Image (cartoon, grey):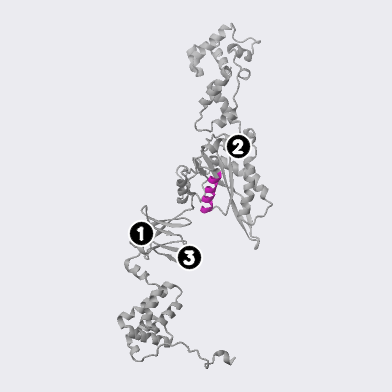
Amino acid sequence: MRTYLDIFRLKFERRMTDRQIALTLNIGRSTVNNILTRFRSLQLEWPLPDEVSLEKLDNLLMPGRNYQSQRVLPDWLKVHKELTSPLVTKQLLWQEYQAEYGNQALGYTQFCEHYRRWLGKQRRSMRQLHKAGEKLFIDFCGPTVRIVDPTTGEYRKAAIFVASMGASNYTYIEACEGQDLESWLLANRRCLEFLGGVPQLLIPDNLKSGVNQADRYEPQLNDSYRAFSQHYGCPVIPARPRKPQDKGKVESAVLVVERWVLARLRHTTFHSLAALNQAIRSLNKELNERPMKSYNGLSRAELFKQIDAPALAPLPEMPYEYTQFKLAKVGKDYHVAFDNHWYSVPHALVGERVELMVTQRLVQIHYRGNVVATHIRSKKRYQHTTEASHMPVAHAVYKDWTPERIHRWAASIGKNTALVVEHIERSKAHVEQAQRSCLGLLSLQKRYSSERLERACGIALEQQHYAIRFIRNILANGRDSQSTPEPATTPTHHINVRGAHYYQ
């Protein structure tokens, strides 16, 4: 009506042409002409008589236009749910609505306008339109839950993982040991298994367990989270830094979890993570089955089955296995370290940079994108896992010297030599150290003969000095030729020999 009055004022008071009025009010010239024609046909005068109100003038100019009484408005909640499907458009829904109500239906422009107004009056979580199965929002709760050791009374804090589907608000809750990388990735995996499928996008926060470097446009995921994304074929798009509205769904879900789940557990003492998760699963089910006022009493679980579940991609055949990535430099002993254990690579790669991809079962080593070594992961600390094919030829021959083979060689030289070898093995902390020392001793046979080595070992047994340097000095100085020691003997057992117990 304001536009109508401006047209009449400019026409009858200021005597402007239709073209001038159209340019002044930024409307079409035909619109100006149409309104003035209707006004003249009513044989009304300007200014309007007192008995003609604005409402009456509107009815006279546009007879029959009464949307409130003649138009049937659609069910906007149903329209909103339908639009979550990627195949459904407003145009299609309007055509179906018009086919059902005919002349009582709104035009397409008014249909879109009324839907926009309805959407603006709903809760904030509905202002952003989410497609079915499109986005899963992920975050950790701020509050933690204590897990108390029943024997010592010490406690640790469990982090609460929360994920929410965009279209249905379907929520997953889990307690984790912390917010470390392993807890984060395994919670993501169990969340997808809980949903029974894979959404199109994962929207996490910029936490250190998932994002190496936060950025508004190109955030950098860590290698493990990128491998998780590739395994499930689901891209990860972290929320922008300091933009909580990007993950408003999970922010709302976190608030709900804090008030409706964690608040109920505040007086309960938990002694294990399993007990805490058992309590959370029960409350999580209750939360998903509780009716929501904004959706005409439908629950999150019902909406998930109707909207999100059919649109999820299937899970891969094999579940994700936690994988760690590490860059390492190959040492001179052609081994790389991981978790205080050393794994071999081909000796030609000494000094090169390689990448380790470590799962719970395997250690896979890559060089320039190619797999160069694969080992079974070992939990033994400060030890080596060596593959013979990775060793130089000389080292591989050395590795073939087993303790049994060394004992046979020593026994072939003589009894004194065999006893010295046994003493050396007992004096060393590790088998490899003893093996090297024994081979160093036995190699003296090639230079000084078996007879001389046997005599030198006899002298070492007499003086109880078993170092290789001592035996080598005996041979180098010829001391073994100056005396012929008796072969080492073992104690004789006889009925006439009294033992130490006889004098007690």
Q: Which residues are magenta?
A: 180-194
Residue 194 marker:
none
Report the side of 479 relative to 21 (left or right): left
Tell me which residue sits at (46%, 43%) in the image.
233
Residue 418, given in percent of the width and then of the height, sits at 40, 81
Q: Main secondary structure of the magenta part?
A: helix
CA gap between label 3 and label 2 equals: 51 Å
Q: Say what secondary structure mark 2 lies in.
A: helix
Residue 462's place in the image compared with 47, above or below, is below
The residue labelled by disc 3 is: 381
Along the line of sight, which residue is nearer the eye, 406 or 321?
406
Along the line of sight, which residue is nearer the eye, 76 or 487?
487
Q: Quick one: which residue is furthest to the bottom in this view?
A: 496
Q: Nearer the viewer, mark 1 or mark 2?
A: 2
CA gap between label 1 and label 2 equals: 56 Å
User: Do callouts 1 and 3 mark residues in contact (Cβ within 8 Å)?
Assistant: no
The residue labelled by disc 1 is: 352
Residue 162's place in the image compared with 330, above or below, is above
Along the line of sight, which residue is nearer the eye, 138 or 399?
399
* Viewport quadrant of the N terminus: top right
Q: Tag 1: residue type?
A: Glu
Tell me which residue sits at (47%, 51%) in the image.
224
Q: Tag 3: residue type?
A: Arg
Q: Earlier in the sequence, mark 3 or mark 2?
A: 2
Residue 61, given in percent of the width and then of the height, sits at 58, 12
Q: Say what secondary structure mark 1 lies in.
A: loop
Residue 302 marker:
2
